[in-house]
Image (cartoon, grey):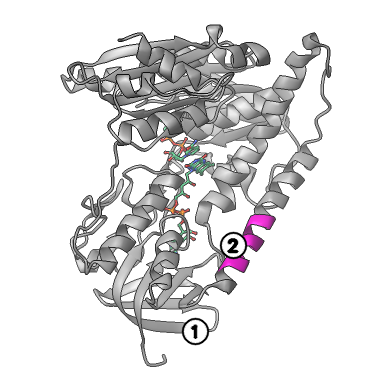
Amino acid sequence: MKKPETIDVLTIGAGGGAYPAAFWLAKRAQRVVMVDPKGVMSGNCLAEGCVPSKAVREMARHVTRHRRFESYGMGGEPTIDYRKIIAHKDNVQRSRYLQHGEELARSRNIELIKGRASLQDPHTVTVETDAGDRRYTVRHIIVASGADVFVPSIPGAELCLTSSDLYRLNPTVKVLPQTLTVIGGGYIGVETASFYAALGVHVTVLQRGRQLLSGMDPDMVAMLVPLLDPRIRVMFEIDVDRIEQGVHGMTVHYRQGDFSGKELSDQVLIAAGRRPVLPEGLAALDIEAGHTGIAVNGALQTSHPHIYACGDVNGRVPLFHAAVRESLVAAHNIMAGDVAADTMDFTNVPTTVFTLPAAAYVGMTRTAAAQRGVAVVEAGYEFLEDSRAQIFGETGGGLRLFFEPRSLRLIGGWVVGIDAGNLIGEIGLACANGLTAQQLAAFADQHPMTSEGIGHAARSLL
Ligand SMILES: Cc1cc2nc3c(=O)[nH]c(=O)nc-3n(C[C@H](O)[C@H](O)[C@H](O)COP(=O)(O)OP(=O)(O)OC[C@H]3O[C@@H](n4cnc5c(N)ncnc54)[C@H](O)[C@@H]3O)c2cc1C
Ligand SMILES: NC(=O)c1ccc[n+]([C@@H]2O[C@H](COP(=O)([O-])OP(=O)(O)OC[C@H]3O[C@@H](n4cnc5c(N)ncnc54)[C@H](O)[C@@H]3O)[C@@H](O)[C@H]2O)c1
């Protein structure tokens, strides 16, 4: 192996938890190396996550609108060519890789190495590349190695599709099945069920617990579920025993209480969660990490103040935009000399489940507040009375805002229905900045947009 190279910062991974910090630090004359076996930036978000899944989602959304718009004098049953939908998805991914490559080529002080990093000691990282191993002496390390599909040890699980088979470049699935069984009713299971149902697939979701999207606010989920495509059948309290491949498709054998049953379908998707990817050498450095991820403080530091863990690998808020903000928090603290000059607000990160329609939440909702014994004042707005929702014929759902009773400071909210993913950004910004019902009410939000509902709800309290 060659003599170690000395650099300022090395990132393990080049996804959302890594590259925002890398660029920010490189601009401030730090010598930065990003390492990722993919050899490209953007991690799993672009490779098989957010962007490709939402490319399929938006096509599916168009189909549902197209069908409904028939009664407004347009369209009719749309034709669906899934191969072309996939080709479009692939093109979006390719063009974004190109864009990121150009950005990297324009930047100074920063290098991306295709390889796998492991930690040798608190200041030494080895990178395994096709051309042999390289060794770096580094002042600061950002571990941003992300998460990967978790496949439970159920006999036959290896026969199932995972989200990667659906959403990666040139994916396995290019032809829509007629029937799909989804094991797991979390983000990936419910989003995919929703997209596929809109594209004409009959989907059955097998969920282990009693609620879809377990862990999310039950009031929000209760408003969402009746609005989902009726082609989606959901079965609760399911324990999957085994999965078999037959001549005419796949069979999932399950138990539901005392009842044993089986579900037949063309294909089975397993969406039972993701697990952090921990780089080799971490345990030897006594960095605390469990199956939920690497333990970090609000400054994103591990037990070694110069080693940071950002994004899915710390398991705190496994979403792309959380990873980006965490990455920048780490960068600010590196520049400050490994002190907590900046901290992450893990509470006010907006979350959207991009089903059709979507559900989104931020901050503390009524249920979360009740669990902690915190009193809240609630205000609501229904899309039934919203002009934009009426224009689109999407009047199902509404929004809820939660305020501190004395100050009427906004501390959380959720939205189900049209524009949920956009509205939650505005609500989240208001929560993060401690805006009050009076301030929300005093803002002339635009007409005819669903964001009018935020001020409308706030005014109902004054
Ligand atoms: C199907 C799907 C849909 C999703 N949709 C959304 C969405 O709509 N919105 C949203 O906010 N989030 C979404 N997510 C989650 C989002 O993809 C992640 O939160 C985000 O990618 C996290 O970024 P990260 O940088 O922490 O990790 P990753 O994106 O996982 O990147 C980690 C990188 O580290 C690399 N790596 C691993 N080990 C090593 C090593 N030893 N050395 C060097 N490199 C290593 C990996 O190759 C990978 O490229 C979705 C995820 C999936 C699977
Ligand atoms: N819109 C978004 O932001 C978005 C979209 C997709 C994925 N993601 C990210 O990807 C992560 C992983 O998503 P996911 O849906 O795989 O996981 P998840 O943790 O959201 O949901 C997994 C679900 O599967 C169920 N389950 C687990 N084992 C089961 C079994 N054996 N049988 C039946 N049900 C079982 C669980 O009860 C849970 O409800 C999310 O946590 C999120 O961070 C985000």
Give the main secondary structure, helix, strand or loop, of the magenta stretch: helix
The answer to whether any part of residue 259 appears in the image is: no
Location of mark 2 (residue): 100
Instruction: Please check the rendered image and state whether residue 100 is part of the magenta-colored stretch, yes or no.
Output: yes
Q: Which residue is mark 1?
A: 132
Q: Is residue 250 left or right of residue 385?
A: right
Residue lying furthest bottom: 3
**Foreground residue, 448 or 383?**
448
* Quadrant in the picture for the N terminus: bottom left
Ligand 2 falls in quadrant:
top left
Disc 2 packing (10 Å; few <14; some 14–19; many ≥20)? some
Give the Cα distance between marks 2 and 1: 26 Å
Give the residue displayed 43% in from the left and 83% down from the top. Answer: 134
Can you give x and y, in whole percent of width and height, for residue 12 in the image? 40, 66
Which residue is at the front of the view, 81 or 375? 375
Q: Position of residue 392 (x, y in %)?
A: 67, 16
Q: Residue at x 57, y 42 (%)?
A: 163
CB at disc 1 and ligand 1 closer than 8 Å = no
Give, as a single range, the part of the protein colored magenta: 95-103
Q: Would you say 324 lies left or right of 60 here?
A: left
The image quarter in which residue 81 lies: top right
Q: Amino acid at mark 1?
A: Gly
Residue nearest the observer in this picture, 369 or 241? 369
Q: Secondary structure at mark 1?
A: strand
Q: Helix or strand or loop: what does disc 2 sit on?
A: helix
> Residue at the spot x=73%, y=14% of the render?
68
Verify whether residue 173 appears in magenta. no
| Foreground tag (2 vs 1) | 2
Work out whether mark 2 precedes mark 1 in sequence or the reverse, and give the earlier one.
2
Quarter of the figure with residue 97: bottom right
